[in-house]
Image (cartoon, rainbow, N blue to C red):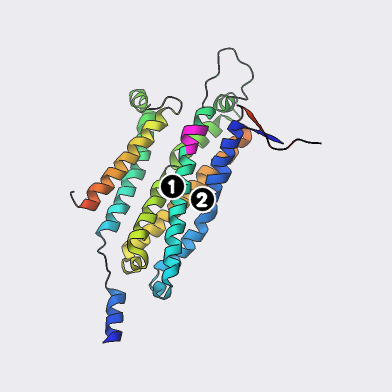
Amino acid sequence: MGILDDIHAAEVPALPNGPGAAAILSAGIGCFAIGLFGFAADKSAVIKSHFILYKPTGPLSGETALAIILWLVSWAILALGRL
Amino acid sequence: MEITVRGFWTLLHGMGFGALYLLACSGALLELYRVCTPQGIHVAPKSNRFLSAYLVTMALLAWAAVLSGTYIVYPWYRAVAPAGIMDLSGYPQLLLKSSPDTIDWHNLGMEWKEHVAWLTPIAITMVAGVFLQYGRDIRKHPALRTAILTFTLVAFLAAGIAGFFGAMLNKYAPVQGGNIIHITHGS
């Protein structure tokens, strides 16, 4: 009985893979957003000017801030299972 | 021996937070691989707590590196020179762009560095979060295990690229200026 319990505990995950998948997918979304916003700001002067949230840092401030917000919001939504 | 305030912050950003993060990467990759493989069932719970603390420290270092880089050092790098100034040593971005021999350190190097570096804190924070949640149980989820190992590797490569370009940029156009901090006085 004890050995069977040990084998069962070794093979059956205590947690489903949902929370982990939510964290991984949202990190992917955040990383993609960094690239996308950087590319968009590079290609369009209008978009670039809209990304300037903190003037000394320029458009990088908006690109990264928006990507971080997108990452954290998507993580929260996916983790709560609302999507 | 003295250092300028801008030089000190650049040193803290690159050699303090960035290099320490890079040094920690190989340990994290090895330990994650060891703990997360099916053979990791024999790993003591104590090493679980150690790895959790290690990954959280790495995430804090990554955030400290990108935030200090973006909001403290980068504004000094891209400072705009007043009209008519000839000495561009206090304006690293303009100094690099002033010569065809160095312009690509900005166009390629800094443009890459300023963006790719941000992948690191996102990736390593996710890895730390997943490991805190699952611990050694992650070895029972092969897909998650592969994903967190891959993201740890991506975070390492992104930090490596940013670190390389940072070192080269600071070699050709160092961020200097501001008040001088006297460390020692020569005899």
Which amino acid, mark 2? Answer: Tyr
Q: Are marks 1 and 2 in contact (CB under 8 Å)?
A: yes
How many numbered badges does the structure rendering display? 2
- Magenta stretch contains residue A63: no
Q: Position of residue B173 (x, y in %)?
A: 61, 31
* Residue B175 in sight from this viewpoint: no
Give the quadrant of the N terminus of chain B.
top right
Membership of B71 in magenta stretch: yes
Residue B141: image location, x then y, percent = 31, 66
Residue that badge 1 annotates: B120
Specify few, some or many for label 2: CA neighbours under 10 Å numbering under 14, 14-19, or 20 or more.
many
Q: Chain of mark 2?
A: B
Q: Residue at x 42, y 60 (%)?
A: B52
Q: Amino acid at mark 1?
A: Thr
According to the image, label 2 marks what residue? B21
The magenta span reads B68-73
Residue drawn at 56 percent across, 25 percent down: B97
Classify A59 as above or below B27: above
Which subunit holds the residue at mark 1? Answer: B
Q: Would residue B33 appear left or right of B180 to someone viewing this image? A: left
Q: Please, what secondary structure does the residue beneath circle 2 have?
A: helix
User: Which residue is found at the position 56% from the left and 24% from the top?
Assistant: B94
Displayed quadrant of residue B9: top right
Measure the alpha-carbon separation of dots 1 and 2: 10 Å
User: At numbered mark 1, what does the secondary structure look like: helix, strand or loop?
Assistant: helix
Q: Main secondary structure of the magenta part?
A: helix
